[in-house]
Amino acid sequence: MEKHRTLAKVCLITSLSLISSAAMASDKSIAELVDAVNGTLDDASREAGKKVKLRNHAKGFCTSGSFIPAPELQQHLDIPFFNQGPIKVTARFSLGGTNAKLSDKTPGRFMSLKIDGDKESLNFVTTNVPIFFASNLDDFYSFQTKIKEGPEGKQWLVDNKPDAKRFLDYVAQLPPSPSFASSRYFGVNSFYFRQSQSGKTAEPIAGKWIFEPLAGTAALSKDELATMDDNFLKPELLARIQTQPAQWELYIQLAEEGDIINDPTVTWPDSRTRLLAGKLVIDGQRDNAPDVTQCGEGIFNPVLLPKGITPSADPILNARTPAYIESFIRRR
């Protein structure tokens, strides 16, 4: 318990030190944002939620692997973290929402990673949808509260919030994948990366994370989906990696002049330059290690970054860690 409290305090100090008041400008507090996600808008439901350790991404599991940096990245970006051998990885694959019994037949897929190097760490929070549903915290609150009202709330979002409509339209046409291993994963938020320039000081360049599955993407047809049960994703991945690792190439998509940096509802053109950062290998070899077996109890801190990478001013990005910590504390 004391270990968890210490972790929460350290993460909170780290994350809050990186968050500007401008980026966090909102009428809603972090606690209210967590209430919106959890659907706990009154004292009674909030206390009930604490008792059952209510959380987002409730349905998920942890496994392990390694990350192999691409040496050629150093020709473009000055990030010493990527200049080392294979790095251990703790991964959590999950579905969205607070329902721990959500069907795997839904389309959303999420992958969170802790990559712990010799001296520094890098965390990822990614999804198979390349756009977010809100560009600011007030719209985030509106989305989370309205979507829980059912069809009427969803229609309100479609009629009143263009970002939410675009997100909902995308998800509506997204077929479920047969495996976590056959999904692309996107970091919808932007970061700044220090460029490599001999003897010169270069301006950092904005970029986004993209994980491309080496096995390729795949989608279930309606007929195939009808034959599946509601819990196929976990056993499929754990069985898969017994014989062959699940692998992704990690790319950094670079922004160009005029691209919108601080809005996760906006995607950049596919023509933008992508730099190979390395390869993610999920093989389950460390699944009995305490940091893996207990990974679902902690948080993945997306602004825990190595030297050479800094957060953008995206308000959604900068609210993530304090919100995760608030949720973490409620589950203790």
Image (cartoon, rainbow, N blue to C red):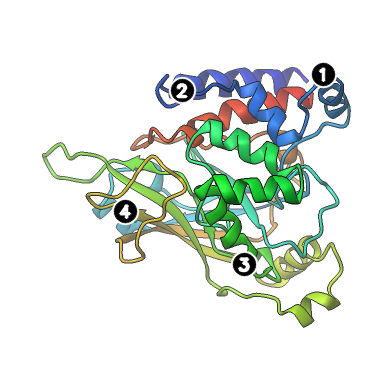
Residue drawn where x is 70% and y is 66% of the image: 241
Q: Does residue 23 appear left or right of residue 272 in this picture?
A: right
Marked residue nearer the N-terminal end (1 or 2): 2
Q: Relative to residue 30, is residue 189 drawn left or right?
A: left
Q: Between disc 3 and disc 1, whose residue precedes?
A: 1
- Residue 51 position by quadrant: top right
The outermost residue toward the left is: 199
Mark 4 vs 2, N-terminal side: 2
Which numbered disc, 3 or 2, marks the residue that appears first in the sequence? 2
Gap between marks 4 and 2, in whole Å?
Answer: 27 Å
Camera-nearest residue between 269 and 293: 269
Residue behind mark 4:
254
3D distance between C-alphas at marks 1 and 4 = 45 Å
- The residue that disc 2 covers is 25
Query: Residue 174, labelled with which disc?
Result: 3
- Residue 236: give x, y in percent of width and height: 77, 68
Q: Mark 1 points at which residue?
A: 43
Q: Is mark 3 on a helix, strand or loop?
A: loop
Whole-number angstrom distance, CA of label 4 to CA of label 3 = 25 Å
Which residue is nearer to you in this view: 33 or 317? Answer: 33
Q: Which residue lies furthest to the bottom in this view?
A: 223
In the rendered structure, which amino acid carries the disc numbered 4? Leu
Disc 2 element: loop
Identity, as a three-letter code, of the amino acid under mark 3: Leu
Amino acid, disc 1: Asp
